[in-house]
Image (cartoon, grey):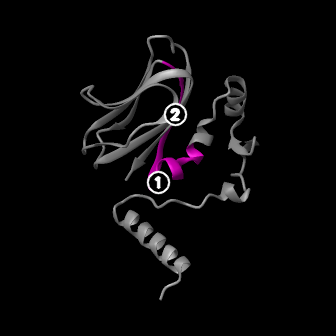
Amino acid sequence: MIAPCARAATALVLLAALLEACGAEAPRARAQAAGAPRPGAAVVDGGEVDGQAARDAARDGLPTAARIAESGGAIAPGMRELSRVDEAAPFERALVHAADKDTCVRVAFAASEPLSVLLVDGAGATLDAVPRAASGVTSTVCVKRTGDLVLRVTRTADGGAGARVRAVAFAAP
């Protein structure tokens, strides 16, 4: 009979092997969790950020993109970080352009006021939308090889123009 801890460890090893076989990255242990910041990084409120990001976060009260990215293991398990965005709304940002393989993407975001966050394909069709939210996570959407995927952030009917948005896109594989 296998002890419960041994069964859990075996399941994690099998999950990591499966993710690797599918081309996805297995969730990684974070050195920051052990209290070791990256060389040259500033540490603010227990989180690692660069100097400008720390000043921006202190001014607008939003989490830094680095802090959002730290949540990747829980928000987008098995996915890798694709890109970070720190812009004023409204804007569009290409996340995937003519990829050499099918790609799935999920975006976590925080904004200074409620906005609409959409993932649209190259033809402009909405694949997922988070309407009227100041923070959240999109559903995972996938595009075929050679497809395009765009993050579109728009204002809501009652405002949002010029709102600050920080987002991190995660992708698999």
The vertical placement of 2 against 147, above or below, is below
- Whether residue 139 sits left or right of residue 49 in the image: it is left
Q: Residue at x 42, y 72 (%)?
A: 14
What label sits on residue 77 in the rendered view? Answer: 1
Residue 33 percent across, percent down from the top left? 68, 56
Residue 161 percent across, percent down from the top left? 51, 13
* Label 1: element kind: loop
What label sits on residue 2 in the rendered view? Answer: none
The vertical placement of 18 against 109, above or below, is below
Q: Provide the residue span drawn in magenta.
A: 69-89
Q: Residue at x 59, y 61 (%)?
A: 29
The vertical placement of 145 against 157, above or below, is below
- Whether residue 44 sits left or right of residue 23 in the image: it is right
Question: Closer to the camera, 145 or 30?
Answer: 30
The vertical placement of 86 against 70, above or below, is above
Mark 1 surroundings within 10 Å by alpha-carbon count, few (fewer than 14), some (14 through 19), many (20 or more): some
| Name of the residue lying farthest toward the top | 158
Q: Quadrant of residue 112?
A: top right
Q: Residue at x 36, y 60 (%)?
A: 23
Residue type indicated by callout 2? Phe
What label sits on residue 109 in the rendered view? Answer: 2
Residue type indicated by callout 1? Pro
